[in-house]
């Protein structure tokens, strides 16, 4: 099923929130037709809901869903390109697809992944999907450090594209990341530690030319990275009652 693109306009924050409430942000499973459009729509809708009343967004606002970049925001008289990326282990969706087809009720034990690398053969992926292969234990702050290294990896990938001229149409570019990295960090203090560890890893990626803003949707939080600092706020869940 083709999902409509997320194109909308709003003259005020209440109007934007009302329009967003009517957006279907459901994302189907891997085995039932999940696409980049589903992921981008989900990510941008939640980002806009969270920032609708912030200083980031001014009005009138027009959102155009497209490609390279994935979105263009016309905020008053300014154009901002927004590139979206999902930070997920390269093999995770292969494992999830196997689980969905063969072991739909299996419980998956935590595995350690490395960004940009494939670590498991076909038999090992099947064992992970079936719940018969347990990962190594997490020690100290190893989960937070792996998260930081993974986020830096995906930021670097998109920054290299920006620096090679992939997004020349819009001079002001934001990067929006959906965190799907498979590490056991959930508590706000763990997320804060992971974000702090990430800051020095991305410092060289925040030198011009670069994204003027980097945002990460991490669990139920929106992280906003600046130069040497970050902020953290809860994501506004407009659709929870649905």
Image (spheres, rainbow, N blue to C red):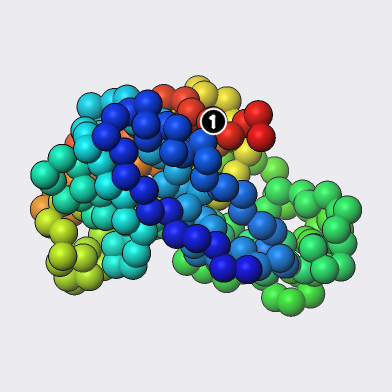
Closest to the observer, 183 or 166:
166
Residue 160 appears at what percent x and percent y? 25, 65
Q: What residue does disc 1 label?
A: 237
Residue 122 appears at what percent x and percent y? 74, 77
Residue 40 is at least partly visible in this image? yes
Q: Is residue 57 left or right of residue 1?
A: left
Does residue 191 lie above or below 37 as drawn?
Answer: above
Q: Secondary structure at mark 1?
A: loop
Does residue 229 lie above or below 44 as drawn?
Answer: above
Residue 211 appears at what percent x and percent y? 21, 51
Q: Residue at x 29, y 26 (%)?
A: 54
Q: Residue at x 52, y 45 (%)?
A: 23
Q: Is residue 232 left or right of residue 221?
A: left
Residue farthest along the bottom direction in this orientation:
122
Does residue 189 lie above or below 183 as drawn?
Answer: above
Residue 14 appears at what percent x and percent y? 37, 26
Q: Quadrant of the N terminus?
A: bottom right
Q: Residue at x 56, y 47 (%)?
A: 25
Q: Residue at x 50, y 60 (%)?
A: 4
């Amino acid at each position: 099923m083709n999902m409509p693109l997320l194109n909308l306009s709003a003259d005020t924050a209440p109007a934007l929130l009302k329009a967003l409430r009517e957006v279907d942000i459901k994302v189907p499973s891997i085995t039932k037709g999940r696409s980049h459009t589903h992921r981008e729509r989900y990510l941008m809708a939640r980002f806009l809901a969270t920032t609708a009343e912030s200083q980031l967004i001014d009005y009138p606002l027009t959102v155009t869903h497209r490609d390279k970049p994935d979105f263009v925001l016309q905020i008053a008289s300014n154009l901002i390109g927004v590139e979206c990326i999902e930070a997920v282990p390269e093999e995770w969706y292969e494992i999830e697809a196997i689980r969905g087809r063969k072991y739909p009720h299996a419980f998956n034990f935590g595995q350690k992944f490395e960004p940009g690398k494939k670590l498991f053969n076909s038999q090992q992926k099947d064992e992970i999907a079936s719940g018969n292969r347990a990962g190594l234990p997490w020690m100290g702050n190893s989960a937070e450090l792996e998260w930081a290294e993974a986020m830096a990896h995906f930021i670097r990938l998109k920054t290299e594209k920006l620096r090679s001229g992939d997004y020349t149409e819009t001079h002001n570019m934001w990067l929006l990341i959906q965190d799907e990295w498979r590490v056991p960090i959930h508590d706000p203090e763990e997320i804060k530690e992971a974000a702090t560890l990430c800051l020095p890893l991305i410092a060289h990626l925040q030198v011009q030319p670069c994204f003027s803003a980097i945002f990460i949707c991490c669990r139920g939080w929106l992280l906003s990275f600046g130069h040497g600092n970050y902020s953290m706020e809860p994501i506004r869940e407009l659709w929870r009652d649905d």
